[in-house]
Amino acid sequence: MEAGLFTANNVWMMICTGLVFFMHLGFSLLEIGLTREKNTINILFKNVFIICVGLLMYYIGGFNLMYPGFAEGSAGILDFAGFGIAPPENGMTPEYADGGYTWWTDFLFQGMFAATAATIVSGAVAERVKLGAFMIFTIIYVGIVYPIAGSWQWGGGFLSTMSYGTAEGFYDFAGSTLVHSVGGWAALIAIYLLGARIGKFNEHGKPRAIPGHNIPFAAAGVLILWLGWFGFNGGSVLSADPATTSLVLVTTSLAAAAGGVSCFIVSTICYKNYDLTMFLNGILGGLVGITAGADQMSPNDAVFIGVIAGAVIVGGVALVDKLKLDDPVGAVAVHLICGIWGTLAVGIFGSLAGFDQFLVQLAGVGIVGAFCSICAFIILGILKATIGLRVSEKEELEGLDRHEHGMDAYPDFGLNEH
């Protein structure tokens, strides 16, 4: 391979790494925008903690747990290549990863994905989770659960070789299941164990809106996430291949746009108002939906996937409320339900479409869902029984910023001037 092409591939992957890192700002702004002012510092603290600890856990063992190099004949379920990230001899040469990037770039790009799974949970449990319990959960889930699930597909494990009829392996291009649903299943278990925020449901069990304090922040967060998704999906090509990369960016954008438009139309028909938060979550639903097959879809396929994802968001949010679960940012609808939809869509649309592939996709969704749900339930259940998951009623009513951090996000300096 030419040195120039190898360098270009690696530079593109480093740019994509930066874009995925930038997504953490998007998640932060979205979460604080859709929640109340009194919990802003708490949410920002969690998001900063996630990216720092996520990278460290991925360095300590997560990377080698996710990419263990399963031995020939292995069941492809669990293996570990050791602690740390010592590179192989060809780690910085075109012989590594088909010349798409170096070992260091590989680690950093994948590490950015790892932290995203816990970020999804952060939004769902906002405004009532104990910070200490959340931090312990993040360390275990990002350090162990996410890499094991990822190894089953991206690490060459049993999902990647699971075949049925004409289908040859489960397919998840950039993580509708392996990132978004992994986070979504944990979010679902967490909000079930935590319970709803005080005041979310009235005495008759009917949901009440708890407005976010800064919708402009939420809108900015979603637009940043859309931009970051160019790295999330575009980088998953694992090189700067012009044809595939450009197709992926087109399908990603079209699905996002279609998801947003579909969601706002359906929600307007159902609720008789133009709800910006639904519009924003529809965009995210389209992005999550296209992520599993962005490289396999035509532009028309991408639009169909986005349209359905947008409608799924409206139904998903209503379903979560009907089940008397409290998800302040719509994480379950966006990341779990649309993640499932996007994964199944690989068997319906695009170059891999077929009944056999659909069944393999369905099996993969079920296997990963069962594993993540059980793990999340065990981790969170132990935390609930020991140190507790939920803050006190007084702390929740007065705000976590004051009680857990001793500061306000927006201090009124005018009152303190003499």
Image (cartoon, helix red, strand yellow):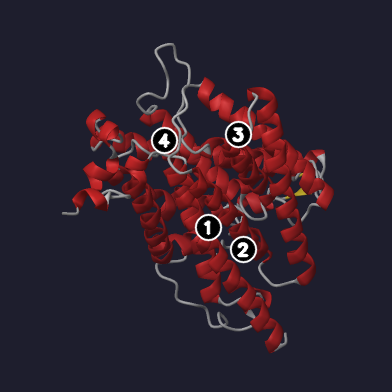
Q: CA distance from mark 3 to mark 2?
A: 28 Å
Residue farthest along the bottom direction in this orientation: 3
Q: Which residue is mark 1?
A: 23
**At label 3, which amino acid type do we have?**
Asp
**At label 4, which amino acid type do we have?**
Ala
**At label 1, which amino acid type do we have?**
Met
Q: Earlier in the sequence, mark 1 or mark 2?
A: 1
Quick check: 108 above or below 320?
below
Res. 274 visible in picture: yes
Q: Residue at x 25, y 53 (%)?
A: 413
Residue farthest along the front direction in this orientation: 418
Measuring from the top left, give residue 257's x and y in whole percent.
71, 47
Mark number, residue 275? 3
User: In what element is the residue under mark 2?
Assistant: helix
Q: Which residue is mark 4?
A: 190
Res. 68 visible in picture: no
Q: CA distance from mark 2 to mark 4?
A: 29 Å
Dividing the image into 4 quarters, which one contains the N terminus? bottom right
Crowdedness of circle 3 by 10 Å Cα count: few (<14), some, many (20+)? some
Measuring from the top left, give residue 49's x and y in whole percent.
36, 56
Judged by depth in the image, the label closer to the viewer, 3 or 4, is 3
Q: CA distance from mark 1 to mark 2?
A: 9 Å
Nearer the observer, 395 or 238: 395
